[in-house]
Image (tube, rainbow, N blue to C red):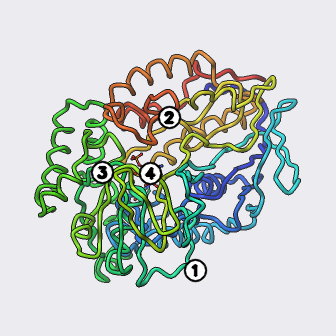
Amino acid sequence: MASTQSAPKSLRIVVIGAGMAGILAATRLLEAGKHEFVVYEKADRVGGTWRENTYPGLTCDVPAHAYTYSFAPNPEWSSYLSPGAEIQRYFESVAEKYALDKFMQFGQEVTRCEWKNGRWELETAKGLKDTADVVIAATGVLHHPSTPDIPGLDTFAGACFHSAQWDHSVALDGKRVGIIGSGSTGVQIVSALAGRASKVIHIQRTPQWIMPTPNDPYTEEQKAAFRANPALIDEIRYNEAYTSAVRRFTEAIIDPDSSQMHEIEAIVQKNLEDSIKDPVLREKLRPNYRAACKRLIYSSDYYQKVQRPDVEVAIGGIKQIEPNGVRMADGSLQEVDVLVLATGFHADRFVRPMRLIGRDGADIDSRWSPSPSAYLGITVPGFPNFFMINGPTGPVGNFSLIDIAERQWGYIEHLLAALESGEARSVELKEETLRAYDERRIAAARKTIFGSGCNSWYLDATGVPASWPWSYDAFAEQTAKPRDEDYVCAA
Ligand code: NAP
């Protein structure tokens, strides 16, 4: 943003959420010498999605050294893809390293955030009130579990819980466990429970394409080398193979007829043909939509695990849940002792259920009806000095959300600088900027592979893929710096 000669201003900043994005915001503010901020977190510790998801097999399918803050490399990752508990410890360690505790208020869920007289007024569920010049919403994407509306669910006699609310008091060894859902979560749980439960039944309404992926452990020698020479970590994070794979993947998403997409299709088809020996099971597991239409699933062992004698795949709709198990639409009963609902999340909530009221009474619920949007996933007209990390329409494909968040943070820093310089008391996205962005975005999104004819959490309430529909490089370029013409700066 253009600078003027006004007096510099110290901003009071409220960050909402202490997950990956909230920790990022807090550490970056501290590194920039800003101490006038607080992070409100509804839970009792940091971690966000990695705190809440503790299901067996939880693994990040982005390479560990790429799913790491650029400013906090971690030579200790145990394997190419890191387990969830390790990622949670990583975030805790970063929070400790920066002594973020003194900036964090745990057990404080922000329930109201309202722009009044040129400032944000906030209130938490416990009645705490605060004001701020700027609010950074780091509230996450997939954090409202979706419980399916299946008849009879409440009649099930055994333990039943959502994958994001895993009940670790329930014994699984020797039990028959049914897992409903074949997204990344369901697939990881099935792989982890195979051989541990007496029987695992994977209940799938829709089979998935599976991308084979290696997941080798790092040896002690490798870790020692990473410790001694952090450049080796950068080599993995920024190496040509990984970055060109990300580039190839985004090119494939945005152009379903591209050679890159045909390459992905060939790999997942070959994986199915080569891995599943029984032709009946192979056909059961064959999706009837294009690869990457739903979020592509990365797994090194799912196809091996489903061929075990103690694992069964039940494909098709569910008629109802009964005390003893799951009655499928074809009339068969899948008898289970424990039922896991790996049925995903309400992906359109973002900062909600917080009541967010902007300038002149603008209400985010109305603004985002029927579907949410934010410019570059960061700003919304009518909501001055309110900046989101990983907000609606940002890139949520199969690559590092940390990288995306860092890019968005870089953009937000420019907006903060404009406010701190005294050049403006508020910065607000122009209505016409979002309108033009949405027009282009929706037209492009319909042409992506996500819009090629399948159901997924990528689709908004109008059936349009809500994810960034352009290249990774375009995102990097457009988030490099805000354009003056996109914002109204009020003095
Ligand atoms: P998801 O991808 O939304 O999958 C939900 C599953 O539940 C689908 O298979 C869906 O079937 C099924 N389902 C929903 N309602 C149902 C019903 N009434 N009856 C039968 N089946 C029903 O959710 P997720 O697996 O939790 O994954 C969500 C996202 O979290 C992922 O896409 C990914 O972005 C992230 N994630 C990432 C990792 C990682 O390794 N990085 C791991 C786990 C999750 P249909 O397909 O038929 O709708």
Q: Secondary structure at mark 3?
A: loop
Q: For the residue labelled by badge 1, is the local secondary structure a helix, a strand or a loop?
A: loop
Disc 2 under 8 Å from ligand 1? The reply is: no
**Callout 4 touching callout 1 (CB < 8 Å):** no
* Amino acid on which the number 2 mark rests in the picture: Thr
Answer whether residue 325 is visible to the viewer in this image: yes
| SS for callout 4 | strand
Q: Considering only order in the chain, which callout, 3 or 1, is on the residue closer to the N terminus?
A: 1
Q: Residue at x 54, y 44 (%)?
A: 347
Q: Quadrant of residue 353?
A: top right
Q: Along the polypeptide, which appears first: circle 2 or circle 1?
A: 1
Query: How far across and down, in percent of the image, does residue 67 sit?
Result: 42, 59
Residue type, mark 4 in image: Lys
Q: Is residue 81 left or right of residue 284?
A: right
Q: Are marks 4 and 2 in contact (CB under 8 Å)?
A: no
In the displayed structure, 325 sits above or below 412; it is: below
| Depth check, front residue: 149 or 208 | 149
Residues at marks 4 and 1, CA–CA distance in whole angstroms: 29 Å
When asked about the image quadrant of residue 348, the answer is: top right
Q: Which residue is mark 2?
A: 393
* Residue at (44, 39) in percent of width and height: 458
User: How crowded is the residue under tag 1: few (<14 C-alpha within 10 Å), some, or many (20+)?
Assistant: few
In the rendered structure, find residue 319 and report the number of the disc placed on it.
4
Graded by Cα atoms within 10 Å as few (under 14), some (14 to 19) or many (20 or more), the crowding at tag 2 reads many
Q: Which residue is mark 1?
A: 169
Q: Earlier in the sequence, mark 4 or mark 2?
A: 4
- Closer to the eye: label 2 or 1: 1
